[in-house]
Amino acid sequence: MKLIKTTEAVGQVLCHDMTQIIPGEYKGARFRKGHVVTEEDIPILLSMGKENLYIFEMDEKKLHENDAAEILCRLCKGANINRSEVKEGKIELVAAIDGLFTLDREKLSAVNSIEELMIATRKGDTAVHKDDKLAGTRVIPLVIDKTKLDQAEDIVDDDPIMNILPYTLKTAAIITTGSEVFHGRIKDKFTPVLIEKLSVYGITVTEHLTVDDGMEHITNAISKVKGKADMILCTGGMSVDPDDRTPGAIRESGADIVTYGAPVLPGAMFLLGYFEDGTPIMGLPGCVMYAKATIFDLVLPRIAAGVKLSKADFVAYGEGGLCLGCDNCTYPQCPFGK
């Protein structure tokens, strides 16, 4: 740091808090450490008796924390994301729409590995609502070497770390399987649950067929709704019992199966496949009907946003994929799927 005349301090960074005392009215820090002196500040500083100021020695190789935070914000802020004003070297990012929060984990880790840089986010690949907080950025010191921000810019390039994807799949077909439902022996309690879950993401059920347990009947039902909805959901018959035919019927329908089974409880018997045109088809185990949070709740926002899932995506759910079965369920404000 160095001592300069206050009248020559515009654009310089203060090294310490500056206390102002107005007898009977005010006593406190009028200017905080790190404040960048403006033209308007000069008369106030002089009235406080500050003829000279200690400032950080800045040059083209260094950045003030606010300027560095602006760079980090730019590297993070992708589509459908709003930002706060910079305050004490920090900027917060919030959702501009309801949608799926996505992030590039490799880039995030690489930037956070650079000494003195920091980006903290919520869990990626999760549903968010408009104005939800997404992330905060800052650098650790008050003044930082510009080369560290240059390194971060090289890592991120022109593709920001974070985005919000809107929900683009808007219609669903439900195929209810089971002779007991088909023949009216029991009431279909599964479909109303799905209608409610889908509505959260703006998805409307436009097709609904009920069939017995015959594999050919299930396959024919799938054929009837193909092309009429953005996704197909099959309920019932998903276990390994000999008379549970839904997984086999989905295979016979021509879908390319991504996974039959997931390292998630509840929801281990979940199935996901895709048809050639990209339409997802899911086989939903019975737990989706009675448990508040299952594998279906984890994948639905991603599928609704048009993200095509892979086997690796399901493998990753193993860590955090155990529902703790709390008496008072607070999902999604809990560790499940995170």
Image (cartoon, rainbow, N blue to C red):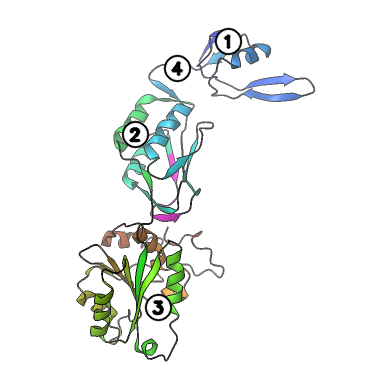
User: Marks 1 and 2, how far apart in space?
Assistant: 35 Å
Labels 3 and 1 touching (C-beta < 8 A): no
- Whichever of labels 4 and 2 marks the residue nearer the N terminus, that label is 4
Circle 2 SS class: helix
Q: Which residue is mark 1?
A: 6
For marks 2 and 3, give the CA distance.
47 Å
Q: Is disc 4 surrounded by few (<14), some (14 to 19) or many (20+) residues within 10 Å?
A: some
Q: Residue 286: which numbered mark, if any?
A: 3
Q: Between marks 4 and 2, how big is the CA–CA gap?
A: 21 Å
| Horizontal and vertical percent position of residue 207 | 35, 74
Name the residue located 62 percent from the left edge and 8 percent from the top edge: 51
Q: Point out residue 322 in the picture as x, y percentages from the top left corner.
A: 42, 66
Badge 1 or badge 2: first in the primary sequence: 1
Q: Which mark is residue 68?
A: none
Q: Which residue is mark 2?
A: 152
Residue stretch in magenta: 119-129
73 falls in the magenta region: no
Residue tagged 4: 58
**In the image, 285: left or right of 280?**
right
Q: Which numbered mark, 1 or 4, is in the foreground of this view?
A: 1
| Residue closest to the eye, 172 or 127 | 172
